[in-house]
Image (cartoon, rainbow, N blue to C red):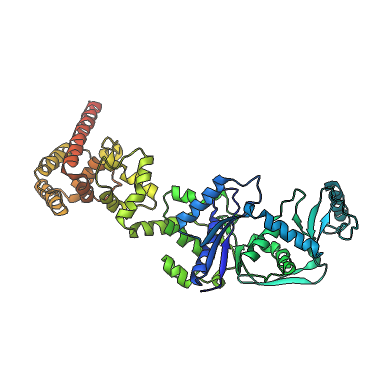
Amino acid sequence: MSGVRLRFAPSPTGYLHVGGARTALFNWLLARKEKGKFILRIEDTDLARSTQESVDAILEGMCWLGLEWDEGPIYQSDRFPIYREFVEKLLLEKKAYKCFCTPEELDAKREKAIQEKKKPQYDRTCLERQTDDSDRPFVVRFNSPESGTTAFDDLIKGRISFNNEELDDLIIQRSDGTPTYNFVVVVDDATMGISTVIRGDDHINNTPRQILLYEALGYPVPLFAHVPMILGADKSRLSKRHGATSVIAYKEMGFLPEAMVNYLVRLGWSYGDQEIFTKEELIERFSIGSVGRSAGIFNPDKLSWLNAHYIKEYEPVRLAELLVPFMKKKGIDVANGPDIVKVVKTLQDRARTLVEMADGAEFYYKAGFSYDEKSLQKFLNGTLASIFEEIAEKFSLVAKADHESIDTLFKNICSGRGLKMKDVALPARIALTGGTAAPGLFDVIEVLGKEETVSRLQRAIEFVKILEQKKIDDNE
């Protein structure tokens, strides 16, 4: 077994963002490729902002995408005693110190540095403090080296180096005794044996401080890979104004998890010209070194194209199961109507999302739909009602409503009237579905069956007669 251990560590202060989902996906893929472990850690040390609702939303998003974890979820809030032990260790070894400076004193130091055109950072007033004013509030600061450089070889961005003099003495424990992010993430990754850290490139500036903490604690430094952010079409940071940013929002909009996974992994990673991958192919071919250095541009149209592909490829039975909740949202019980699997088969080649499919399926279950009058007016003539009557009469005599029988019936009607197929088929489609934007006529008839088809034709006959009479009255 591989010793590779990767993790995804979201903060439960909101939903699972598409950027976070992509980071989780990259970690998951590398863990699966290397036959290692994928750990889910919930970074909930911000007790004021962390909520169980957000945790549930993150877990739901992960499960929907199929990113199962091997260990976890591990909650940082359960590990406070461990963090305190490591703080005490650093204090004992003089690698950290207590700082008793008040907020007012720190503000004054910051203002002075700005006036002197220096970088505003802590001036280490308390580093050599002899007295321990334990009755006063204090924070604990890491004793950072004042000279030299801290560098690392990023698996995506290459060599990155920082001057240590630019890194001030980081607070690792607040005055209320709670640890800070940069400290706990190091303790967690170190004690959990994380070998590779894949995360967003907004964490690059945190990395040198974290490397120094690894070294101070005596743990090996993991490999780092910083993934470029995802931008909207206007090349600004992806936000709600570019569309949905929650993974679950895309589920609710009728996207399939396979399409979302395929799309997210291609936002920054490529394998030749191949666009569509199975999960097995992704695991086999994924490489963190093949992730690009520039930001990915989120393109909803490309995602819709991918989703349409997966809808076409999906097993109709499974697709029908996924469609049922979307039909329920429209107030439709699919038990009261044609076989939902047969309905799905007529719509698979047309729909880009399950929402679109539900919209397209509605006419199958609601016989009282309204007609597209503009389309009817286009075909309206003295023979339209009689055409519908002939179709209904002959169709009621057909033994079986299969494709061959329907085709023969319509050809005979066209031949007897000296009409082309479109002159009969298009008006009939409007009569049965309400408009021309519907599946093929013969497919619709097969799904509706004889009784419902005849019933809808009779309704259309009455409607057409009313329209014809209105047309005569208007011309008088």
Residue 434 visible within the image: no
Please identify the quadrant where the C terminus is shown. Answer: top left
Is 322 left or right of 169, judged from the image as shown?
left
Expressed as whole percent of the image width and height from the top left, the position of residue 16 reads: 54, 52
Expressed as whole percent of the image width and height from the top left, the position of residue 146 reads: 83, 67
Nearer to us in this view, 114 or 60: 60
Question: From this viewpoint, which residue is outermost toward the right?
Answer: 130
Expressed as whole percent of the image width and height from the top left, the position of residue 32 reads: 49, 68
| Residue in view at x 18 percent, y 37 percent | 455
Residue 6 visible within the image: yes
How many labels were placed on the picture?
0
474 in relation to 4, above or below: above
Expressed as whole percent of the image width and height from the top left, the position of residue 84 reads: 72, 56
| Residue in view at x 80 percent, y 72 percent | 148
Is 118 left or right of 371, judged from the image as shown?
right
450 in relation to 316, above or below: above
